[in-house]
Protein backbone atom coordinates (compact mmCIF):
# COMPACT_ATOMS: atom_id res chain seq x y z
CA UNK A 1 0.00 0.00 0.00
CA UNK A 2 2.95 2.29 0.71
CA UNK A 3 4.11 2.01 -2.92
CA UNK A 4 0.67 3.11 -4.14
CA UNK A 5 0.59 6.07 -1.77
CA UNK A 6 4.13 7.12 -2.73
CA UNK A 7 3.15 6.93 -6.41
CA UNK A 8 0.07 9.06 -5.78
CA UNK A 9 2.14 11.65 -3.89
CA UNK A 10 4.68 11.88 -6.72
CA UNK A 11 2.18 11.91 -9.58
CA UNK A 12 -0.46 14.20 -8.11
CA UNK A 13 2.12 16.27 -6.25
CA UNK A 14 4.02 16.85 -9.49
CA UNK A 15 0.83 18.02 -11.16
CA UNK A 16 -0.02 20.32 -8.25
CA UNK A 17 3.42 21.94 -8.41
CA UNK A 18 2.84 22.88 -12.05
CA UNK A 19 -0.37 24.66 -11.02
CA UNK A 20 1.41 26.55 -8.21
CA UNK A 21 2.74 29.30 -10.47
CA UNK A 22 5.07 30.83 -7.91
CA UNK A 23 6.72 27.54 -6.97
CA UNK A 24 6.99 26.52 -10.61
CA UNK A 25 8.57 29.81 -11.70
CA UNK A 26 11.10 29.69 -8.84
CA UNK A 27 12.08 26.14 -9.80
CA UNK A 28 12.40 27.10 -13.48
CA UNK A 29 14.52 30.13 -12.53
CA UNK A 30 16.78 27.93 -10.41
CA UNK A 31 17.31 24.96 -12.76
CA UNK A 32 16.10 26.19 -16.17
CA UNK A 33 13.06 25.23 -18.25
CA UNK A 34 14.51 22.06 -19.86
CA UNK A 35 15.73 20.65 -16.53
CA UNK A 36 12.41 21.48 -14.86
CA UNK A 37 10.42 19.76 -17.61
CA UNK A 38 12.75 16.76 -17.51
CA UNK A 39 12.44 16.43 -13.73
CA UNK A 40 8.66 16.87 -13.95
CA UNK A 41 8.41 14.15 -16.61
CA UNK A 42 10.64 11.81 -14.59
CA UNK A 43 8.77 12.37 -11.32
CA UNK A 44 5.33 11.90 -12.86
CA UNK A 45 6.45 8.81 -14.84
CA UNK A 46 7.95 7.32 -11.66
CA UNK A 47 4.73 8.18 -9.81
CA UNK A 48 2.64 6.48 -12.47
CA UNK A 49 4.87 3.38 -12.41
CA UNK A 50 4.61 3.19 -8.61
CA UNK A 51 0.83 3.63 -8.80
CA UNK A 52 0.60 0.70 -11.22
CA UNK A 53 2.91 -1.47 -9.11
CA UNK A 54 1.18 -0.55 -5.87
CA UNK A 55 -2.23 -1.21 -7.39
CA UNK A 56 -1.26 -4.49 -9.03
CA UNK A 57 0.75 -6.03 -6.21
CA UNK A 58 -0.47 -4.27 -3.07
CA UNK A 59 -2.65 -6.13 -0.59
CA UNK A 60 -6.39 -6.35 -1.18
CA UNK A 61 -8.14 -4.90 1.87
CA UNK A 62 -11.93 -5.00 1.53
CA UNK A 63 -13.80 -2.03 2.98
CA UNK A 64 -17.27 -2.60 1.57
CA UNK A 65 -18.88 -5.01 -0.86
CA UNK A 66 -20.31 -3.18 -3.90
CA UNK A 67 -23.44 -4.64 -5.49
CA UNK A 68 -22.80 -6.71 -8.62
CA UNK A 69 -24.54 -4.27 -10.95
CA UNK A 70 -21.96 -1.57 -10.18
CA UNK A 71 -19.34 -3.37 -12.30
CA UNK A 72 -21.22 -2.10 -15.38
CA UNK A 73 -20.72 1.53 -14.42
CA UNK A 74 -17.02 1.72 -15.40
CA UNK A 75 -17.71 -0.17 -18.63
CA UNK A 76 -20.34 2.43 -19.49
CA UNK A 77 -18.56 5.60 -18.33
CA UNK A 78 -15.10 4.78 -19.64
CA UNK A 79 -16.21 5.17 -23.26
CA UNK A 80 -17.05 8.89 -22.89
CA UNK A 81 -13.96 9.29 -20.68
CA UNK A 82 -11.73 8.09 -23.53
CA UNK A 83 -13.53 10.34 -26.02
CA UNK A 84 -13.05 13.33 -23.68
CA UNK A 85 -9.40 12.44 -23.16
CA UNK A 86 -8.81 12.60 -26.92
CA UNK A 87 -10.95 15.75 -27.25
CA UNK A 88 -8.55 17.47 -24.86
CA UNK A 89 -6.01 17.66 -27.69
CA UNK A 90 -8.38 18.59 -30.53
CA UNK A 91 -9.96 22.05 -30.91
CA UNK A 92 -13.58 21.00 -31.25
CA UNK A 93 -16.96 21.83 -29.77
CA UNK A 94 -16.44 19.23 -27.02
CA UNK A 95 -13.31 20.98 -25.80
CA UNK A 96 -14.83 24.44 -26.22
CA UNK A 97 -17.93 23.52 -24.22
CA UNK A 98 -16.21 21.59 -21.41
CA UNK A 99 -13.07 23.78 -21.34
CA UNK A 100 -11.10 21.03 -19.58
CA UNK A 101 -12.29 17.68 -20.96
CA UNK A 102 -9.32 15.82 -19.47
CA UNK A 103 -10.43 16.74 -15.96
CA UNK A 104 -13.98 15.63 -16.78
CA UNK A 105 -12.52 12.35 -18.08
CA UNK A 106 -10.56 11.85 -14.85
CA UNK A 107 -13.69 12.56 -12.79
CA UNK A 108 -15.69 10.02 -14.81
CA UNK A 109 -12.93 7.40 -14.53
CA UNK A 110 -12.45 7.93 -10.80
CA UNK A 111 -16.15 8.12 -9.90
CA UNK A 112 -17.05 5.04 -11.95
CA UNK A 113 -14.30 2.98 -10.38
CA UNK A 114 -15.01 4.22 -6.85
CA UNK A 115 -18.59 2.99 -7.12
CA UNK A 116 -17.60 -0.40 -8.54
CA UNK A 117 -14.72 -1.22 -6.18
CA UNK A 118 -14.93 -1.45 -2.42
CA UNK A 119 -11.33 -2.06 -1.42
CA UNK A 120 -8.83 0.26 0.23
CA UNK A 121 -6.56 0.50 -2.84
CA UNK A 122 -9.51 1.65 -4.93
CA UNK A 123 -10.58 4.23 -2.39
CA UNK A 124 -7.03 5.61 -2.20
CA UNK A 125 -6.40 5.59 -5.94
CA UNK A 126 -9.72 6.75 -7.34
CA UNK A 127 -10.55 9.01 -4.40
CA UNK A 128 -7.19 10.79 -4.75
CA UNK A 129 -7.61 11.34 -8.46
CA UNK A 130 -11.20 12.50 -8.05
CA UNK A 131 -10.14 14.99 -5.38
CA UNK A 132 -7.25 16.20 -7.54
CA UNK A 133 -9.50 16.69 -10.58
CA UNK A 134 -12.03 18.68 -8.55
CA UNK A 135 -9.30 20.85 -6.99
CA UNK A 136 -7.61 21.37 -10.37
CA UNK A 137 -10.89 22.42 -12.00
CA UNK A 138 -11.66 24.90 -9.24
CA UNK A 139 -8.17 26.38 -9.58
CA UNK A 140 -8.44 26.64 -13.36
CA UNK A 141 -11.86 28.25 -13.12
CA UNK A 142 -10.50 30.90 -10.75
CA UNK A 143 -7.52 31.51 -13.01
CA UNK A 144 -9.78 31.90 -16.04
CA UNK A 145 -11.91 34.45 -14.18
CA UNK A 146 -8.80 36.46 -13.27
CA UNK A 147 -7.08 36.27 -16.64
CA UNK A 148 -10.04 35.92 -18.96
CA UNK A 149 -10.19 33.31 -21.66
CA UNK A 150 -10.33 33.88 -25.39
CA UNK A 151 -12.93 31.84 -27.27
CA UNK A 152 -11.46 28.60 -28.58
CA UNK A 153 -11.80 27.65 -32.24
CA UNK A 154 -14.15 24.72 -32.65
CA UNK A 155 -14.50 22.14 -35.39
CA UNK A 156 -17.13 19.42 -35.72
CA UNK A 157 -14.59 17.38 -37.66
CA UNK A 158 -12.33 17.31 -34.61
CA UNK A 159 -15.25 16.14 -32.49
CA UNK A 160 -15.84 13.25 -34.92
CA UNK A 161 -12.11 12.42 -34.82
CA UNK A 162 -12.21 12.48 -31.00
CA UNK A 163 -15.24 10.21 -31.03
CA UNK A 164 -13.65 7.70 -33.40
CA UNK A 165 -10.19 7.65 -31.80
CA UNK A 166 -11.65 7.65 -28.28
CA UNK A 167 -13.91 4.71 -29.15
CA UNK A 168 -11.01 2.73 -30.67
CA UNK A 169 -8.80 3.46 -27.64
CA UNK A 170 -11.62 2.45 -25.30
CA UNK A 171 -11.97 -0.88 -27.06
CA UNK A 172 -8.22 -1.52 -27.25
CA UNK A 173 -7.54 -0.53 -23.65
CA UNK A 174 -10.48 -2.47 -22.27
CA UNK A 175 -9.69 -5.56 -24.29
CA UNK A 176 -5.90 -5.70 -24.14
CA UNK A 177 -4.20 -3.17 -21.83
CA UNK A 178 -6.49 -3.24 -18.79
CA UNK A 179 -5.88 -6.97 -18.15
CA UNK A 180 -2.12 -6.54 -18.68
CA UNK A 181 -1.58 -3.36 -16.65
CA UNK A 182 -4.25 -3.76 -13.98
CA UNK A 183 -4.53 -7.53 -13.85
CA UNK A 184 -8.32 -7.51 -14.18
CA UNK A 185 -10.34 -7.85 -17.38
CA UNK A 186 -12.27 -4.65 -18.04
CA UNK A 187 -15.10 -6.27 -19.94
CA UNK A 188 -16.69 -8.69 -17.47
CA UNK A 189 -20.31 -9.25 -18.29
Image: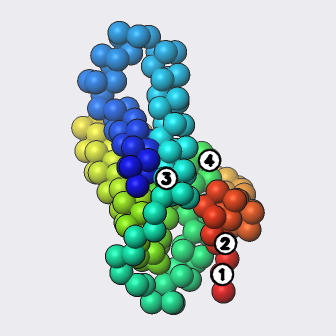
Q: Nearer the viewer, mark 3 or mark 2?
A: 3
Q: Vertically, is 76 above or below 37?
A: below
The structure residue drawn at horizontal position 32% and vertical position 57%, both measured from the top left corner, is 131
- Front residue of this view, candidates 17 and 9: 9
Front of the two marks 4 and 1:
1
Q: How far is mark 1 from mark 3, CA to CA?
A: 23 Å
Determine the secondary structure under disc 2: loop
> Which residue matches tag 4?
90
| Residues at discs 2 and 1 in contact (Cβ within 8 Å) | yes
Residue that appears at 44% across and 47% down = 3
Position of 120 compared to 57: left or right? left
Q: CA distance from mark 4 to mark 3?
A: 33 Å
Chain-order first, disc 3 or disc 2: 3
The residue where tag 1 is placed is 188
Task: Give residue 164's position: percent from left, percent from top.
Answer: 73, 62
Q: How far, Cα to Cα, is label 3 from label 2?
A: 18 Å
Amino acid sequence: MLILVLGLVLFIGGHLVTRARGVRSRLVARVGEPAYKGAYALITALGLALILLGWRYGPFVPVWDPPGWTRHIPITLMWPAFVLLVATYLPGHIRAKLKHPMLVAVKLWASAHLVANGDLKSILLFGSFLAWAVIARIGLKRQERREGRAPQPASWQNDVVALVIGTVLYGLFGTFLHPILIGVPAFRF
